[in-house]
């Protein structure tokens, strides 16, 4: 802590007097962080949308994936039948999640 306080005093003695006009201008005119705020907001928006896009692509890839409830064989079926047949054991499987309890 003493080191930090020593650096502050050193700044006041050496740097501040030589840059006095710059600090006076900053106090009078102020700083405008608008560009920084806009760039941070745009970066956050870009990250958010890219993650949503990636998540959507992952779910789209699993849309046609079916796991047989009898032999647990995972396969893809691009047909429109409500109960596609498992290519491994021939059992009929419903599309989507099993909503039954038990």
Image: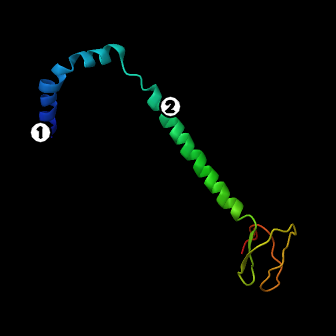
Q: Secondary structure at mark 2?
A: helix
**Relative to residue 46, is residue 89 depicted above or below?**
below
Which residue matches tag 2?
A: 38
Which of the two residues, 85 or 97, is positioned nearer the viewer here? 85
Rendered position, 41 above or below 26: below
Q: Is residue 51 left or right of residue 3?
A: right
Q: Residue shown at 17%/26% (left/top)?
A: 15
Which is nearer the eye, 91 or 99? 91
Label 1 Cα neighbours within 10 Å, binned few <14 / some 14-19 / many ≥20: few
The image quadrant that residue 60 belongs to is bottom right
Image quadrant in which the C terminus is located = bottom right
Q: Residue furthest top?
A: 28
Residue at (61%, 55%) from the top-left corner?
54
Q: For this rendering, which residue is in front, 98 or 10?
A: 10
- Image location (x, y in percent) of residue 28: 32, 13
Is residue 59 rendered to the left or right of residue 24? right
Please name the residue that numbered disc 1 is placed on: 2
């Amino acid at each position: 802590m003493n080191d930090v306080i020593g650096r502050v005093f050193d700044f006041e003695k050496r740097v501040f007097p030589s840059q006095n006009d710059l600090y006076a201008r900053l106090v009078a005119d102020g700083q405008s962080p608008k560009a920084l705020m806009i760039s941070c907001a745009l970066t956050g928006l870009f990250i958010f949308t890219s993650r949503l896009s990636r998540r959507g692509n992952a779910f789209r890839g699993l849309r046609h994936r079916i796991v047989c409830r009898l032999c647990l064989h995972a396969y893809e079926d691009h047909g429109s039948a409500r109960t596609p047949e498992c290519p491994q054991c021939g059992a009929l499987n419903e599309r989507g999640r099993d909503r039954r309890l038990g």
